[in-house]
Image (cartoon, grey):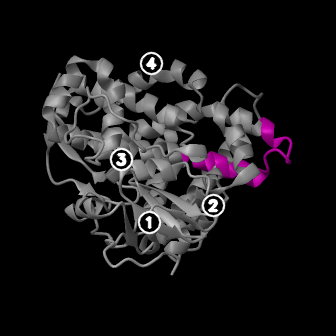
Amino acid sequence: MSLVDAVDIPFLELSDPAFSIRSQQVREARERSWYAHTPYGIAVLRYDDVGKLLRDPRLRQGSHAWPAHNDVTGLFADWWLRIVLNRTGEDHARLRRLASPAFSPKLVVPLQPRFAELADEIVDAFAASGRCDFVAEFAEPYATRVICLLLGLDHSEWRTLADNVADMGLALGVTFKQDVAKIDAGTASLFDFAHRVIEERQTRPPGDDFLSKLLQANEDKDTLGDQELYDMVVLAIFGGIDTTRNQLGLAMSMFIEHPEQWRLLAARPELARSAVEEVMRVRPTVTWITREATENFAYRDLHIARGTTIHLFSESAGTDPRVFPPGFDITAERKPHFGFGGGVHHCLGHVIARADMTEALKVLPRRLLSPRYDGEPIWLPDSGNTGAVELPIAFDGS
């Protein structure tokens, strides 16, 4: 065993699709111990320990092991191992430097008024009916078309992009192995799209956009190789759509359950940015962040062997009663959440995600009054990367 055995340490069955990261079992485990055993390694449950281990230099990004944990190979698994998220050392630093300018506030801030216009335009399509599937009719088109704006892509293909990304996103949940055929088909389609976009863009004079910057770097193959170029374009599309779509659906569910907070946000749209942070604290789509030990070391009462996978439970940390009083309050001052990770692997796209969700949460409370469930939502498993598959809601018009 890689860990010192302890009979009183809780065990959490993360591989079970019925397992919930928000269950009473996890809450009780967090009170008993700062960590738990799982089929994938250990889970860290408390805020202070998650914060420390997230930045511990003895740990590397651990997500590279996710396909192996699920005994999966194939197109998605191969891509997953190549991307910047799962690189280390100079390779990681080089790819991150190349991608960072595309995700800077300098690029994103001028686009925020267009994000707001886009949100209004999408709501216009269903507002008169007083009901919608919030995921299919708002969160998915909004998240996808924001990425089209950022990357200079044709909006007419947003539906295909969204479908491919949704299929790929199944890889980040605990049903990875059973869904691998659909996941790989979505991955193949998104790579076909990336090849077409790059070939078309190569016929134009370079601009000041993300794809142009990558193509300029690709002219020097030692700076950015051809495969790295395609991998990065697919990652930008996948990462920008999947998490934002899921996070917006989770935000709507939280506000349906806390209608007074929705009314407050409608009256005070300047709270939209803090609303994003509060939603991500208590209901993050990324429910855990993965690290892997690069050496043998001891942390608190635990001996950790090199190669041990460590899941840092961002949801459990964000609701830890040692740090946060119970409740959901968009006006409260909070310690930072871990929804975007931390350390050298802090999410590259956090500026975009915060900006586009903020603009959406300024528009939606003004347009969708008194939202409530209009049928039974269908959810992805409540662990790994989670979110709503279908979120039928009804609302009053503005």
Corner quadrant of residue 99: top right
Residue 9, percent from left and from top: 33, 72
Q: Secondary structure at mark 3?
A: loop
**Residue that numbered label 3 is attached to:** 284
Q: Are marks 1 and 3 in contact (CB under 8 Å)?
A: no
Q: Is residue 357 left or right of residue 84?
A: left
| Position in image of residue 122 (x %, y %) | 34, 31
What is the number of the mark on residue 301? 1
User: Mark 1 to mark 2: distance in Å?
Assistant: 37 Å
- Judged from the image, the secondary structure of the residue bearing numbered disc 2 is helix
Left or right: 55 with respect to 254?
right
Q: Main secondary structure of the magenta part?
A: helix
Q: Residue at left 58%, top 47%?
A: 345
Q: Is residue 206 magenta?
A: no
Asked whether the beta carbons under mark 4 and mark 2 sit within 8 Å of each other, the answer is no
Judged from the image, the secondary structure of the residue bearing numbered disc 1 is loop
Q: Name which residue type carries label 2.
A: Trp
Q: Nearer the viewer, mark 4 or mark 3?
A: 3
Residue 324: x, y in percent?
Answer: 27, 41
